[in-house]
Image: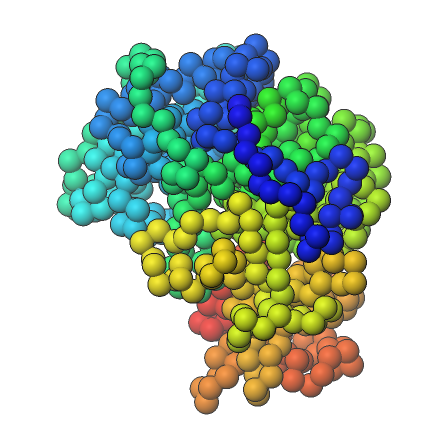
């Protein structure tokens, strides 16, 4: 694959002095599209294992052939360049195949969480207008009942069990409770579909039917680097989620930046575990594109299950594990209990939430490898900053900008004013991984994509004297009380130090007269109780008066997303409703 230079090293990127040995300050980016990326891996690693699913293995050559057949099937359904193809799938081989098949036709992939409600799916389908959806059979009923006006014409139903090895498929048929429970978690089962009030005329076919059209002919339109590849919906801190438009160049660049960041990787010899959902930007880049670009074996898990992970690790030990802190903690604890060695895992990168020092120490003791924290957003494909894999890292920070990435820290009320070093401000990012804008939302795009290619992250950060970045809070999550700004993270850090507090989330609740009250939702540690008045007294001894919560709500647990991120808006809604 040819490459393109992204320019000479910049003297205004002082953080490059902290890069690990072998990480280039000046990176040459691949040309072409993600189609070229996959084709290159098929040529270079044809007989090597590309995918592993419950032990069933698919070689790179077999993966390329399956993508060609799926592309031919999509073409027969009328998919053309620029059309949107919706994926409503967990991690599975069919997800990888469908993703790259759509791109091969120049179509645009739209990723969805298969556990979304009918209402959430309807909003997104109304927004992107996909005519074809490739859907896990457990979610087909929800997609099938979408109203006729969303434009969906064809649904491809995907079963996970046929992708598993024969012996496991047979075991799932056993008439025992454990087998029935496992089968119910993976498949829809036999039951009549829910009635649809206004049924739309939609073609519903099985995955194997999609693959029956034969392989795609050699001559077909191929997407260019600047073409739109994926629409990835953001979590939506406020209002409805927005579709971030990621181009082939964006995703290629981020895969190349990730590869450069870990100079110790060995192409064609790594094993990457896909425990993060690929419908999330973090899992999509590190597993769908990065892993395949280096010829890795990608071990797929429909959802995170520590038992499945450790079982797979015995046969195909992981060498690179992207995850989130709770996953690292659970794997390390379970492996220690069962006497399972984790020393094959040389590199691990954490994102989406703060990485506690205790987690780093526990994981690195168990593996002997590195665990570093990175930073990114859906709009940056997603990774933009990271701690170096080496002694120059700084735990507690999100590291320094990736190669070819620039940052600024500005006054959020006037982005033309840069903040002084060490002063908190809003983080702006510029680089080849920055997205093309929001789908069908020109005004919102204009608000965040500024002149010169700078993207407003909405995150409040500070940069220390060594150019390492620390995230302080989300701009939209700052609580305005009595004319003062309160950082939820700062209050959470204090409350988490109180004995008996296992988990905490601080939100702002509206006051009748305007402004907000600081309110804390807390979860007690096992066997401990929390006296709200004692907790508030502790807070008053450690925080300015205006930052102290007005009340404390004790909860059994905090709602979290599939990757473990606290759902702050859901907690706020629950407290507003008085539940």
Q: Image point 48% across, 38% down: which residue?
A: 249
396 to the left or right of 185: right
Residue 36 at x, y percent in the picture = 47, 25
Residue 46 appears in the picture as rendered: yes
Residue 124 at x, y percent in the picture = 33, 49
558 to the left or right of 452: right
Name the residue nearer the viewer: 195 or 488.
488
Q: Tag count in the figure? A: 0
Residue 151 at x, y percent in the picture = 21, 42
Name the residue nearer the viewer: 185 or 180.
185
In the figure, 422 relative to 49: above or below?
below
Name the residue nearer the viewer: 49 or 309.
49
Q: Image point 78% across, 48% down: which residue?
A: 17
Residue 530 appears in the picture as rendered: no
Residue 286 at x, y percent in the picture = 58, 36
In the figure, 69 relative to 551: above or below?
above
Q: Image point 75% across, 44% down: which residue?
A: 19
Q: Image point 29% across, 32% down: which residue?
A: 81
Residue 329, located in which quarter of the rendered image? Answer: top right
351 to the left or right of 77: right
Q: How is the image coloured?
A: rainbow
């Amino acid at each position: 694959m040819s490459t393109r230079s992204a320019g000479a090293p910049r003297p205004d990127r002082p953080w490059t002095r902290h890069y690990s040995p072998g990480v280039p300050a000046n990176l040459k980016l691949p040309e072409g599209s993600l189609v070229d990326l996959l084709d290159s891996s098929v040529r270079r690693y044809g007989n090597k294992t590309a995918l592993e699913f419950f032990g069933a293995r698919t070689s790179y050559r077999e993966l390329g052939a399956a993508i060609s057949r799926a592309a031919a099937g999509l073409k027969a359904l009328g998919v053309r360049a620029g059309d949107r193809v919706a994926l409503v799938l967990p991690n599975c081989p069919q997800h990888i195949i469908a993703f790259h098949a759509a791109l091969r036709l120049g179509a645009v992939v739209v990723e969805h969480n298969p556990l979304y409600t009918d209402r959430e799916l309807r909003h997104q389908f109304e927004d992107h207008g996909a005519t074809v959806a490739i859907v896990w059979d457990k979610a087909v009923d929800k997609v099938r009942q979408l109203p006729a006006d969303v434009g969906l014409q064809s649904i491809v139903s995907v079963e996970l069990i046929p992708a598993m090895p024969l012996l496991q498929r047979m075991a799932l048929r056993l008439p025992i409770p454990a087998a029935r429970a496992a089968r119910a978690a993976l498949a829809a089962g036999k039951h009549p579909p829910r009635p649809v009030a206004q049924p739309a005329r939609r073609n519903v076919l099985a995955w194997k039917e999609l693959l029956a059209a034969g392989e795609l002919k050699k001559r077909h339109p191929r997407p260019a680097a600047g073409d739109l590849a994926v629409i990835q919906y953001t979590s939506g801190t406020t209002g409805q989620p927005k579709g971030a438009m990621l181009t082939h160049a964006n995703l290629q660049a981020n895969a190349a930046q990730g590869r450069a960041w870990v100079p110790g990787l060995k192409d064609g010899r790594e094993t990457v575990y896909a425990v993060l959902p690929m419908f999330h930007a973090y899992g999509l880049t590190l597993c769908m594109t990065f892993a395949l670009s280096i010829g890795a074996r990608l071990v797929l898990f429909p959802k995170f299950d520590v038992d499945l992970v450790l079982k797979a690790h015995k046969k195909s030990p992981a060498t690179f594990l992207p995850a989130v802190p709770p996953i690292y903690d659970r794997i390390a604890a379970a492996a220690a209990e069962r006497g399972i060695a984790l020393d094959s895992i040389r590199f691990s990168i954490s994102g989406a939430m703060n990485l506690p020092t205790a987690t780093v120490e526990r994981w690195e003791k168990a593996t002997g490898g590195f665990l570093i924290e990175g930073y990114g957003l859906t709009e940056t494909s997603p990774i933009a900053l990271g701690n170096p894999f080496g002694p120059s890292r700084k735990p507690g920070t999100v590291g320094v900008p990736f190669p070819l990435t620039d940052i600024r820290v500005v006054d959020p009320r006037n982005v033309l004013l840069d903040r002084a070093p060490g002063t908190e401000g809003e983080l702006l990012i510029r680089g080849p991984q920055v997205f093309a804008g929001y789908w069908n939302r020109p005004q919102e795009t204009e608000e965040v994509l500024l002149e010169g290619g700078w993207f407003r992250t909405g995150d409040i950060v500070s940069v220390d004297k060594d150019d390492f970045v620390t995230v302080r809070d989300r701009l939209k999550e700052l609580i305005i009380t009595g004319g003062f700004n309160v950082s939820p993270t700062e209050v959470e850090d204090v409350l988490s130090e109180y004995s008996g507090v296992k988990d905490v989330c601080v939100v702002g609740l509206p006051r009748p007269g305007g402004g907000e009250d600081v309110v804390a939702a807390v979860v007690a540690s096992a066997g401990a109780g929390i006296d709200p008045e004692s907790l508030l007294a502790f807070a008053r001894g450690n925080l300015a008066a205006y930052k102290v919560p007005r009340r404390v709500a004790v909860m059994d647990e905090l709602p979290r997303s599939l990757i473990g991120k606290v759902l702050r808006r859901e907690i706020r809604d629950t407290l507003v409703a008085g539940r």
